[in-house]
Image (tube, rainbow, N blue to C red):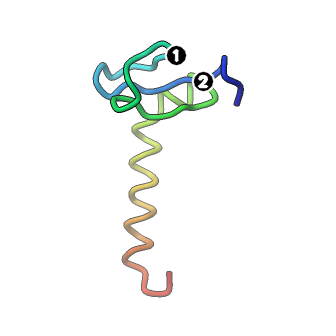
Amino acid sequence: MTDEQRWWYCLRHNRVEGEDGCPGKDRLGPYPTREQAEHALETVRERNEEWDEADRDPSG
């Protein structure tokens, strides 16, 4: 991931932003592509489900 190709998803504005966006506390990322940043909330939801399932699995 290069510095000039990083993208974030802004939780405050519900949109993808480049380097000069909102403060980090309001963003998810960085992501290497704009498309990945567009799916940030979906990625978070999937990871949370995986972690919740791992917490429920005693063999885990």
The residue sitting at 45% across, 20% down in the picture is 16
Say above or below: 9 vs 59: above
Q: How many marks?
A: 2
**x, y (%) of residue 53?**
41, 70
Q: Amino acid at mark 2?
A: Arg
Residue farthest toward the bottom in the current orientation of the protein: 59
Q: Residue under circle 2?
A: 6
Q: Residue under circle 1?
A: 18
Element assignment for label 1: loop
The residue sitting at 43% across, 64% down in the picture is 51
Q: Amino acid at mark 1?
A: Gly
The residue sitting at 39% across, 48% down in the picture is 45
**x, y (%) of residue 50?**
45, 62
Does the CB distance between marks 1 and 2 fall below 8 Å?
yes
**x, y (%) of residue 54?**
45, 72
Residue farthest toward the right in the current orientation of the protein: 2
Quick check: 33 left or right of 16?
Answer: right
The crowd level at tag 2 (other Cα within 10 Å; few <14, some 14-19, many 20+) is some
**Which of disc 2 and disc 1 is earlier in sequence?**
2
User: Which residue is nearer to you in this view: 1 or 36?
Assistant: 1
Element assignment for label 2: loop
Residue farthest toward the top in the current orientation of the protein: 20
| Mark seen at residue 53 | none
The residue sitting at 39% across, 19% down in the picture is 15
Quick check: 6 left or right of 18?
Answer: right
The alpha-carbon separation of the residues under discs 1 and 2 comes to 6 Å
The crowd level at tag 1 (other Cα within 10 Å; few <14, some 14-19, many 20+) is some
Question: Which quadrant of the rendered structure holds the N terminus?
Answer: top right
